[in-house]
Image (cartoon, rainbow, N blue to C red):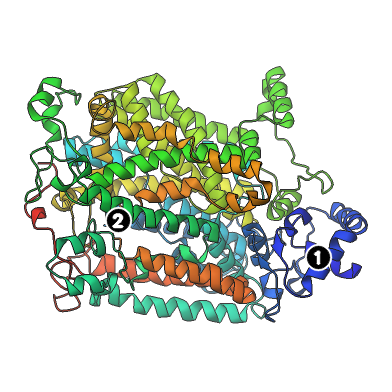
Amino acid sequence: MAQEAPKITDIGVPLEQVSDVREVGPEAEAITQVRMVRANSEASSLSDMEKKSSSTVEVKHQESTRSSTDVEDNGREKVSANMEVVALKALHTDDDPTQNPWTFRAFFLGLALAAFGSSLATIFHFRPQSIGISITFLTVISYVFGNAMARYIPSKGPIGRFLNPHGFNSKEHMGIIIMASSASSTAHATDVLAAQKLFYNIVPHPAVAIMLLFSSQLLGYGLAGYLRESLVYPTAMIWPSQLPLASLIETLHRNRTEMASRWKFFWIIFWSIAVYEFFPQYITPVLTGVSVFCLAQQKNHMFTNIFGGAAGNEGLGVGALSFDLQYIGVSAFFLPLKMITNAFIGYVLCIVLFVILFYKNVWSAMQFPFLSQQLFAAESNSTHYRIYNQSAILNDRLELDEEALKQHGLPFFAATHASALLTTNLATGATILHIILYHPQIVKSAMGWGTHSWRRYLKYLKNPKQIFKYEEKTFSPTEDPANLDPHHRTMLQNYKEVPNWWYGICLGLSVIAAGACIYLAESTLPWYLFFLAIVIAYLYVVFFGALSGLLGFHVPIGSAIQLLGGWLNPGKPLSLMFFSLFAFTTSGQALYLVSHLKLGQYGKLAPRCTFTFQILGTVVGCILNFALMSSITTEQRDILLSIQGTNIWSGTHVQSFNSNAISFGALSKFMFVGGTYASVVYALPLGFLIPLPLWLAGKAWPKYAKSLSYIVTPVICAHLGFLSGGINSSVFMHFILAFTVQFYVRKKYPAWFLKYNYLLAAALSGGLELTIFFLTFIFNGAVMKQIPMPNYALNPKGNLDYCMRDPALAGARGGQ
């Protein structure tokens, strides 16, 4: 038995974590024997690791680290109850440091795909449903072009060796993906710029606008770098969304014979979904949401509110069946079952809550749309919605004119939107206490409360030059923390870490640039609130980044930030926009970049290479975000200002951002502090108390502590407002798929799950993005003239699910 021990532990799972695995069949006996021989086997294995040279790691695919591909499909494998173990078993932990990512090919393709990804992300930002750019799609494209360049570009002579030094390898590929993915999200400063243009007719100078984008993005990157030891290196920080991509990279680049079945599986699924998506996306849009209830009652508006959901802000989509993967999403394949279960509880409660709020007429709900992110005037009624004229209550300096406010009255939210703000505040407070109670080690590490951190700070105080001196990370296997991710442990042996002062320079330059933008853009934001925003952003990344790394979900704290900003500097909506930008959206960018650092760790990409590629991708993305935002807000202005928009373009994000700036910034002391929506404010401190009863119950009855810890109150609270906007007909199908995959497939077919599940998610995502890209640019008017599909039974004129359209929406227009 002693000879079998290394096979259990060589995946890098500490034995304390193996105890969290449910054993099935004879493997249980093997694990028991491993624990018995630990003292003998560990010392010898660690000694061997110490003898390895960091520059001479031998890679042998057939003798590589044990992974999912080595598991026999005999129906008796361990079924992991711990996602940390699943993440480790699904990926190899070996490395070949001789692979070179610093090639012309990597930079050329990385920059090209960064431009492509940022363009597509900006377009999706103005679509009715928030859809992230699939990095899988960029991965497939880069793989095709990378291999084409390696095959067809001459490799002889100095120029040939520069352009094509060797075959296309996984490190190059990972570098390209890091660069492209850093650009493939919409810079959040575009919301500020778009709101200024659409609602206030303010168009900042392009140089100021681009500098604002740069500073907000790179500020987030500086924060991300300083927190990588807490949010990237530990094994518990799995960042579930990165697992499909890491699995795909392995499939594409490891030994072709070893990966033959996975390779074939990926391409079959990829092209199948690419062809299929032409139907729900263009030919038969009715597949977006099929509601038997609406088909039975096509003239009943209550049925629309409850069972409709195929259009933006249409209804809750209860029981609707969606066959459009674009809206169902692929997160069902990689989110932990713990996350999915808590989200489903919140989803069910959200339906009940919204129906009660509206039909009990809470906050005068029936005077306004069932779902909307706009601000409405008091004169609205169920037959005609009157959008609040927010410009009329602001003076020439875009500050609140209280005399004008008395004349026009206070605005109102749709009750469901107000409820979503309230429950988000609950989730904000609950997240902070949840992380403190259940994961205190993360907070201690991030805040520098450990002994090692204080010694380092004292050294810097005694000799500031030490800040700029590179310190070799030398965690020996015997000193290595038990929770250190084995992927990172491998990298420590082979690569130099990025010094903290590199991130410090990013942070410092971003602060200087942002301060200049605040002045040049006449933001009305005081300098001290700007620095407070940075502190808040750091704390947000600590607490909400921990939840995201553990479960793949983070709570948007925009409403809490806006409440604070409006209270500190009341009557100035523009000030609040900038405060929110640097407090909330900068931290969101930091989380995005932290997840990419984890991806680089899974792919064994040298940290300094990851740093360089992320910076370049971010810069390219900012420039194109600005250019496309300017074009779309000019060409689609009327649609972006309408309540419901179309199934192609929607101003939901910008409308919500602006209405919150008015309500929280200009009107916070009238609407929230003792006003109509005072409960939204009270929800924030109340949220801090929500996790406490369950935690105390676990301490009082230890035998139930593990079961009680499965209830994640921040996730439940956040999903209490989950259906407040967008296309909801897909949500029910998302949960059906998620429970099928994570509960049934993962337990009944564990070997298949480890080998194919994350690859399946990658293939579905990649094929879907290919079709959406083609349709968006060719048929939906992103570049060429729009070519609409003729109306017929499977592409109706009204709501796609045949639910009754709200007659009061006719004529209602944003900004009027």
The residue sitting at 61% across, 50% down in the picture is 237
Give 634 or 69, whichever is nearer the viewer.
Answer: 69
Q: Residue 668's spot in the image, x, y percent?
A: 27, 28
Mark 2: amino acid:
Ile
Q: Residue 323's spot in the image, x, y percent?
A: 34, 73
Residue 306, quarter of the rendered image: bottom left
Q: Single out the residue that lies furthest toward the right.
A: 40
In this view, 264 is above or below 376: below
In this view, 511 is above or below 750: above
In this view of the protein, can residue 573 be seen by the observer?
Answer: yes
Mark 1: amino acid:
Ile
- Please rate how many residues cluster around mark 2, counting C-alpha atoms within 10 Å: few if below 14, some from 14 to 19, many from 20: some
Residue beneath label 2, please?
123
Q: Quadrant of the N terminus?
A: bottom right
Q: Single out the residue that lies furthest toward the front.
A: 701
* Whether label 2 touches label 1, CB < 8 Å: no
Residue beneath label 1, please?
31
Which type of secondary structure does the marked residue at label 1 adopt? helix
Give 809 or 768, whichever is nearer the viewer.
Answer: 809
Q: Nearer the viewer, mark 2 or mark 1?
A: 1
Mark-to-mark CA distance, 2 and 1: 51 Å
Q: Is residue 86 left or right of residue 650?
A: right
In this view, 628 is above or below 378: below
